[in-house]
């Protein structure tokens, strides 16, 4: 048995485990386990649903030996899935990190319509064309060409964001009994309810990454890794 923390990393919409390339070297105190959600990466073509996404996370967390601290971290879609997992499994995690996943759709109907509208365009526009258009926007926000997702994950976007809009709520965190790191870029549209999420947490840490957008894990790797490292070290101390 080892007391070395396990850090499970869950990517954002359209991305996959490659989103976390380089993080292992920046967080040497933990064993990193990036996972692919249904419809993304190694699970391309599998239908996305909340239950299927939670099953992926549960399998990864379940690989930890009894007594080994597990920190679960997710970006965007991965953050919402991680929050849902923590809500359904109190007492399991030693830490939870939500990056760009603190906008409550129930509080912002216009934002919800924007995301579901984007997802609704995909079947008509096509994943290849949509990926080219969206990737162009991400390049302008500072993401490098090597970090951009291919068309694979775009096909899962309609189901993924429909699930987030229907199910994600700030009050899911009320029963989470581990430290919760709430992280957003300064210009992150999905950080709009950062303080509201914090009010629902028993033990929150609110962190804003200056000059970062929703793509902070790609454009500000050092700062995001430092936050993840703090979560890991706190989990070890606890």
Image (cartoon, rainbow, N blue to C red):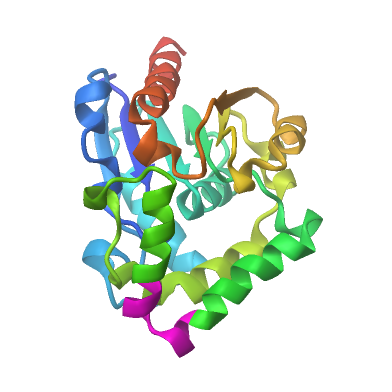
- Tell me if I can see residue 179 in this picture: no
Residue in the picture at 38% in, 26% down: 69
Residue in the picture at 51% in, 75% down: 158
Along the line of sight, which residue is nearer the eye, 110 or 167?
A: 110
Residue 5, horizontal then vertical, whole percent: 32, 24
Residue in the picture at 71% in, 45% down: 170
Which residue lies most toward the bottom here?
A: 124
Task: Read off the magenta span.
Answer: 122-131
Question: What secondary structure predominates along the stretch shown in magenta?
Answer: helix
Along the line of sight, which residue is nearer the eye, 96 or 143?
A: 143
Q: Is residue 221 above or below residue 113?
A: above
Position of 52 compared to 112: left or right? left
Residue 234, horizontal then vertical, whole percent: 45, 15
Q: Quadrant of residue 197?
A: top right
Which residue lies most toward the front here?
A: 140
Q: Quadrant of residue 154?
A: bottom left
- Tell me if I can see residue 202 in this picture: yes
Residue 22, horizontal then vertical, whole percent: 21, 33
Residue 165, horizontal then vertical, whole percent: 65, 65
Position of 20 compared to 79: left or right? left
Along the line of sight, which residue is nearer the eye, 116 or 60?
A: 116
Q: Is residue 126 magenta?
A: yes
Position of 223 compared to 149: left or right? right
Along the line of sight, which residue is nearer the eye, 220 or 161?
A: 220
Residue in the picture at 56% in, 35% down: 184
Position of 115 compared to 67: left or right? right
Can you say which quadrant of the picture contains the N terminus?
top left
């Amino acid at each position: 048995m080892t007391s070395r923390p396990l850090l499970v990393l869950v990517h954002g919409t359209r991305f996959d485990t490659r989103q976390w390339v380089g993080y292992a070297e920046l967080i040497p105190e933990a064993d990193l386990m990036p996972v692919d959600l249904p419809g993304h990466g190694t699970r391309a073509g599998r239908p996305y649903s909340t239950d299927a996404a939670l099953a992926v996370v549960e399998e990864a967390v379940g690989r930890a030996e009894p007594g080994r601290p597990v920190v679960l971290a997710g970006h965007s879609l991965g953050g919402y899935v991680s929050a849902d997992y923590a809500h359904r499994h109190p007492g399991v995690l030693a830490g939870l990190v939500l990056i760009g996943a603190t906008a409550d759709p129930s509080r912002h109907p216009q934002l919800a319509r924007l995301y579901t509208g984007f997802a609704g365009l995909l079947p008509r526009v096509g994943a290849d064309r949509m990926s080219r258009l969206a990737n162009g926007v991400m390049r302008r926000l500072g993401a490098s060409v090597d970090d951009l997702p291919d068309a694979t994950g775009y096909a899962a976007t309609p189901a993924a964001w429909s699930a987030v809009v229907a199910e994600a709520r700030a009050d899911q965190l009320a029963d989470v009994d581990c430290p919760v790191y709430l992280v957003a870029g300064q210009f992150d549209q999905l950080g709009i309810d950062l303080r509201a999420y914090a009010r629902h947490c028993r033990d929150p840490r609110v962190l804003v990454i200056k000059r970062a957008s929703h793509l902070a894990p790609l454009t500000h790797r050092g700062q995001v890794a430092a936050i993840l490292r703090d979560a890991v070290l706190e989990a070890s101390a606890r």
